[in-house]
Amino acid sequence: MPGPSELSSPALGCLDRQLGEALDLAVACRFLSDRARTDGDGLTAVVLERLSSDLTDQAAILAPLARVERPAGGPPLPDGSSSDSGSWLAELDARLGRAALIAQTDAMAPDLEPIIVGLLSALAALYRTRRELLLVSTVLDAA
C-alpha cells in the first residue's frame, strides 16, 4: 500500500477525515454498548461492541495512510443523564448514515488513487450494513 507521501492531497484529506470519523464512532459505539448492556439490551450491546471493533480495525488500516495522528481528545459521548435509549440510538443511526454518505462522496472525488476509492467505498458499505444490523438488533431487543 502507498504511504502518505505517495498519495495526492485530496486522498490525504479524505483519509484524515475518515480516520477521525471511524475513531470517533468506535469510541461512541463502545460507550453505547456498555450502556445497552446496563439497560438489558444484550443483542444491541453485542452489535455495538462488534461495530466498535470493526471501526477500530478500519481505523488501523487507514492510520498508516493518513498524514497526522488524531489528537487524544476523543469525540463527544452521548449524554449519560438521558435514560432514553431510543434517542442515543437515533443519534448513532444518524451519525452512521452521515458517515456512509461522506465516505461515498469522498470516494467520488476526482483524481483519487484507485486504492483510496476502494477503501472509501468499503468504509461506506461498512457504515451502511452495520447501521442496518443495529436497526434489526434494536427491533429484536424491543420484542
Image (cartoon, helix red, strand yellow):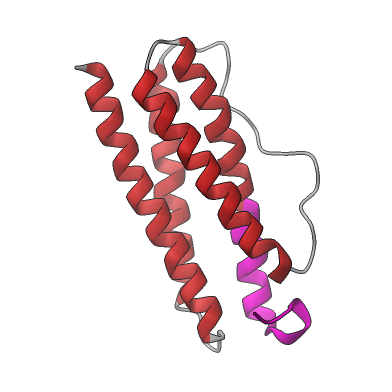
Is residue 8 toward the left or the right of residue 137 in the image? right
Residue 8 placement: quadrant: bottom right
Given residues 130 and 112, the one toward you in this image is: 130
Membership of 6 in magenta stretch: yes
Q: Could you tell me what secondary structure mostly forms the magenta stretch?
A: helix
**Count of picture labels:** 0
Near-viewer residue (60 or 128): 60
Q: In which quadrant of the rendered image does the N terminus lie?
A: bottom right
User: In the image, is residue 62 above or below residue 91?
Assistant: below
Q: Is residue 82 magenta?
A: no
- In this rendering, the answer to whether 118 lies above or below 44 is below
Residue numbers of the magenta segment: 1-20
The outermost residue toward the bottom is: 111
At a point 44% along the width and 51% down the height, the residue shown is 98
Q: Residue 6 falls in which quadrant of the image?
A: bottom right
Q: Nearer the viewer, residue 18 or 61?
A: 61
Please report the residue visible at 63 percent of the width from the left and 47 percent of the height from the top.
23
Looking at the figure, which quarter contains the C terminus? Answer: top left
- Residue 109 in the image, given as x and y percentages of width and height: 50, 80
Residue 102 pos. (x, y %):
47, 61
Residue 85: % across, % down: 40, 18
Asked whether, in this view, residue 1 is left or right of residue 126, the answer is right
Q: Quadrant of residue 124?
A: bottom left
Image x and y of residue 26, in percent: 57, 41
Q: State the residue at coordinates (42%, 52%).
A: 127
Q: Is residue 24 above or below residue 5?
A: above
37 vs 47: above or below = above
